[in-house]
Amino acid sequence: MSGASVLFIGGSGVISAACVREAVEQGFDVTVLNRGTTGGRPIPEGVTRLQADVSDRAALAEVLGDRTWDVVINWIAFTPDQVQADVETFAGRTRQYVFISSASAYQTPATHLPITESTPLKNPYWQYSRDKIACEELLMQAYREQDFPVTIIRPSHTYDETKLPLTGGWTAVARMRAGKPIIITGDGSSLWTLTNSRDFAVGFTGLLDRAEAIGEAFTITSDEAPTWNQIAEEIAAAAGVDDLEIVHVPADAINAVDPEWGAALLGDKANSSVFDNSKVRSLVPWYRPRIPYRQGVREVIAWFEAHPEAQVVDERLDALMDELAERWAV
């Protein structure tokens, strides 16, 4: 049992909620700070709850008071100004500050696989990733110059029972069930790593309150990297679809008609992503992901079946997929 005190800024998201649950199970003294205005995922019993909008630094300072924590984790920092504010707020008040970066910060496309923590950080396609890189650089400078105790975590595609990896989420499942083609970028053979949030949480909590993790960056993913065609087939099987039709469309063509969708493809999903988890296992040797996507996607479909209100079809995206399918069908 750890007993170390941990502050989660955020804590009800896809990844963070699983990490809160795992931290509680591991015996950490957990506090969750969020706005308290969204439904989110339930917070376990025994967790201390603080309510504030972290963008309102005065309100945040009032809520935090003079408290200190062994570990502070910010799940909702995306830009350098947000991270700089955290450095100013938590310097001298925590023994470990954990920044949630992104595996999309790695060189895109990678020149070699598997991707490791020594792979350069460079993503010219996606602003989200460039912002994460800038955050990391600021934090490492604070570590070198101020001894700010940062640990950087780089998740790749991590899901829980509410999330589908195909663009449009449930829209893609609805198309499958309606006998309409779905859109997969490229030829569908690129490899994509999918990690269940419950698995991720085991590796993540193993790095908390660890002196060896200070000043270091860690990738945490599963070791399973199916192709996008295989991912679509697993979703179809879980959804009870026997005759799946896929239309392959180049990422550049998608980007030309929908730059937001295109940026997420060119800057992330269109590129093969396979990771080496040796570094996290060097500190957390018990980290062994146990939930294959074939099992995980069944949980996802079951969740959507139990929550019909979440079965939302994006009509704009659905129409765009129709157009792309008609143009690129062989």
Image: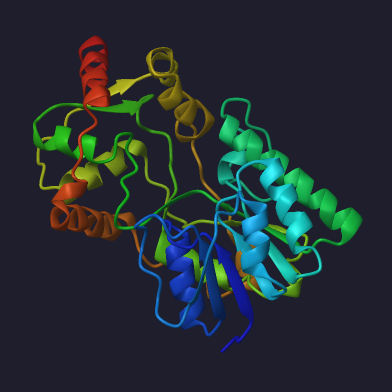
In which quadrant is the C terminus drawn? Answer: top left
Image vertical order of residue 305 relative to residue 261, above or below? below
- Can residue 107 be seen in this snapshot? no
Dividing the picture into quarters, in which one does residue 15 lie?
bottom left
Image vertical order of residue 31 relative to residue 154, above or below? below
Does residue 9 appear to the left or right of 148 in the view shown?
Answer: left
Q: Residue furthest bottom?
A: 1
Q: Residue 62 versus residue 277: which sits nearer the camera?
A: 62
Q: Residue 184 versus residue 40: which sits nearer the camera?
A: 40
Image vertical order of residue 225 relative to residue 185, above or below? below
Counting every numbered tag in the picture gives: 0
Residue 108: give x, y in percent of width and height: 59, 32
Q: Residue furthest top?
A: 327
Image vertical order of residue 151 relative to residue 169, above or below? below
- Can residue 234 be seen in this snapshot? yes
Dividing the picture into quarters, in which one does residue 68 lie?
bottom right
Residue 175: give x, y in percent of width and height: 16, 32
Does residue 3 appear to the left or right of 83 in the view shown?
Answer: left
Residue 245: give x, y in percent of width and height: 17, 29
For the point 50% across and 71% down, the residue is 202
Does residue 12 appear to the left or right of 174 in the view shown?
Answer: right
For the point 45% across and 35% down, the residue is 269
For the point 88% across and 55% down, the residue is 144
Q: Residue 152 versus residue 112: which sits nearer the camera?
A: 152
Dividing the picture into quarters, in which one does residue 212 lie?
bottom right
In which quadrant is the N terminus drawn? Answer: bottom right
Residue 166: give x, y in percent of width and height: 32, 38
Colour style of the rendered protein structure: rainbow
